[in-house]
Image (cartoon, grey):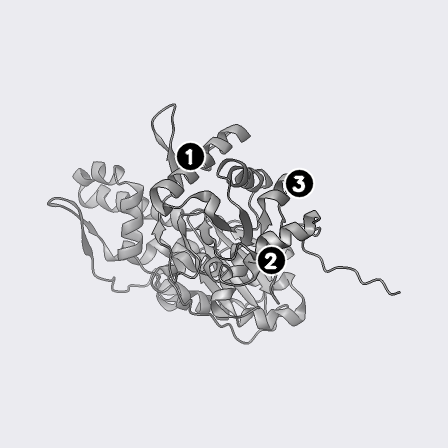
């Protein structure tokens, strides 16, 4: 039996293997599950210093390899509780992940963990699987940046990619800055408490207490008009210690998503600039099929504000003679925005795609690489040669 027939046979007889779906950000679970079984940070304990560090903190390829080995060892033997050899793996990845990272990741999974099958799928593309649509403008508002990739008829349109380096982390930093400014005048004794706020606490304040205000109120604040602020909220830091979060900070902390930087880029203009880069006939379907995902996308009011910003900006002089779009529409994700991409990967895991498109350990050892969605070598239609 030749190698090709053996690989096909091997895939068919392995249909009963568990499929582990991993979104390297934080989420993992089993195919077909409606939500991840666990959400954990992608961190490990440094064996040299004893300190916790991200798996993405590395200087050499060997250090990255060791980081991933430690991470997957913890994942399989402390969380998943399955033998890696008995599983297939779906990795929900960013299309723009460094080649070094994805190659090292495959090496760890195949050669160290000894998994049988691996399928890497783009997060922006599989997110649309949760809606059963093939056209969408997918925006991932994550921790460090917002990343936009249009998907048309199931194919990512990479030349229209846009990114904005303001996302969840920037909002948390803004909350801390605004609190320091407020308490410097209101109660200087609280400054040391604010300086020592952990990232987890700032994230909790962002998610539970902050919201995105309306376009109308935002314009009034920019014009320095007097408007009544929302109510302040007491946040418990632990024990009996309380920190009052002023209503004005709750309302304005997220405004940095909509404030233009020196290059006139913001979350709304990123979407409009991406639409300018796609073909004219693609613009209307994409504008009417916007999907937000990522933890920051779950902040109250962000979707409504974004739609109103788009409807306002598209009529300004910069866009009105270039983009002839009358309406923008946004999908409601069937899951929490924090794991929309993971859910798409879970759906892939119950289709034939995972059996026919995955790479086996034998194929990897023979060829030494894995398909890359951003590489035309793997993402082109076959040529048809007439007889």
- Is label 1 in a helix, a strand or a loop? helix
> Disc 2, disc 1: CB below 8 Å?
no
Residue drawn at x 42%, y 43% as measured from the top left: 83
Compare marks 2 and 1 and give the one earlier in the sequence: 1
Q: Which one is closest to the eye, mark 2 or mark 1?
A: 2
- Is label 3 in a helix, a strand or a loop? helix
| Residue 182, percent from left and from top | 25, 47
Circle 1 packing at 10 Å, graded few (<14), some (14-19), many (20+), is some
Circle 3 packing at 10 Å, graded few (<14), some (14-19), many (20+), is few
Residue drawn at x 50%, y 33% as measured from the top left: 65
User: Which quadrant of the figure contains the C terminus?
Assistant: bottom right
| Residue 349, percent from left and from top | 49, 59
Residue holding disc 3: 366
In this view, which residue lies farthest toward the bottom? Answer: 326
Circle 2 packing at 10 Å, graded few (<14), some (14-19), many (20+), is few
Residue holding disc 2: 356
Side of 29 relative to 367 (left or right)? left
In this view, which residue lies farthest toward the right? Answer: 387
Compared with residue 3, is residue 128 higher up or lower down, i.e. above or below?
below
Is residue 315 visible in the rendered image? The answer is no
Compare marks 2 and 3 and give the one earlier in the sequence: 2
Q: Nearer the viewer, residue 343 or 95?
A: 343
**Label ID, residue 70:** 1
Q: Which one is closest to the eye, mark 1 or mark 3?
A: 3
| Residue 307, percent from left and from top | 45, 68
């Amino acid at each position: 039996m030749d190698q090709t027939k053996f690989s096909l046979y091997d895939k068919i007889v392995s249909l009963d293997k568990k499929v582990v779906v991993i979104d390297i950000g934080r989420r993992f679970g089993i195919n077909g599950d409606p939500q991840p079984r666990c959400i954990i940070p992608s961190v490990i304990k440094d064996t040299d210093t004893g300190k916790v560090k991200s798996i993405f903190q590395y200087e050499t390829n060997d250090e990255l390899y060791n980081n991933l080995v430690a991470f997957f060892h913890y994942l399989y033997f402390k969380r998943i509780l399955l033998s890696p050899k008995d599983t297939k793996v779906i990795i929900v990845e960013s299309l723009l992940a460094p080649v070094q990272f994805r190659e090292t990741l495959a090496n760890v999974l195949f050669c160290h963990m000894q998994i049988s099958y691996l399928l890497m799928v783009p997060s922006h593309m599989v997110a649309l699987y949760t809606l059963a649509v093939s056209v969408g403008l997918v925006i991932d508002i994550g921790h460090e940046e917002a990343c936009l990739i249009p998907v048309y008829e199931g194919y990512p349109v990479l030349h229209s990619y846009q990114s904005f380096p303001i996302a969840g982390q920037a909002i948390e930093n803004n909350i801390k800055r605004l609190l320091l400014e407020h308490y410097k005048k209101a109660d200087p004794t609280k400054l040391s408490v604010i300086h020592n706020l952990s990232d987890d606490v700032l994230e909790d304040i962002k998610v539970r207490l902050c919201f995105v205000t309306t376009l109308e109120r935002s314009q009034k604040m920019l014009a320095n008009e007097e408007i009544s602020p929302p109510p302040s909220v007491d946040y418990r830091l632990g024990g009996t210690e309380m920190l009052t979060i002023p209503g004005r900070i709750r309302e304005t902390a997220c405004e940095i998503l909509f404030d233009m930087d020196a290059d006139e880029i913001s979350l709304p203009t990123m979407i409009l600039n991406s639409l300018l880069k796609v073909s004219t006939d693609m613009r209307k379907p994409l504008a009417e099929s916007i999907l937000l995902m990522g933890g920051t996308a779950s902040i109250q009011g962000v979707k409504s504000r974004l739609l109103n910003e788009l409807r306002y900006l598209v009529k300004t002089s910069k866009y009105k003679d270039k983009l002839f779009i009358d309406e923008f529409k946004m999908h409601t994700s069937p899951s929490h925005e924090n794991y929309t991409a993971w859910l798409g990967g879970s759906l892939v895991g119950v289709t034939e795609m995972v059996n026919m498109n995955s790479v086996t350990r034998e194929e990897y050892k023979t060829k030494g690489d894995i398909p890359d969605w951003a590489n035309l070598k793997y993402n082109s239609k076959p040529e048809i040669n007439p007889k």
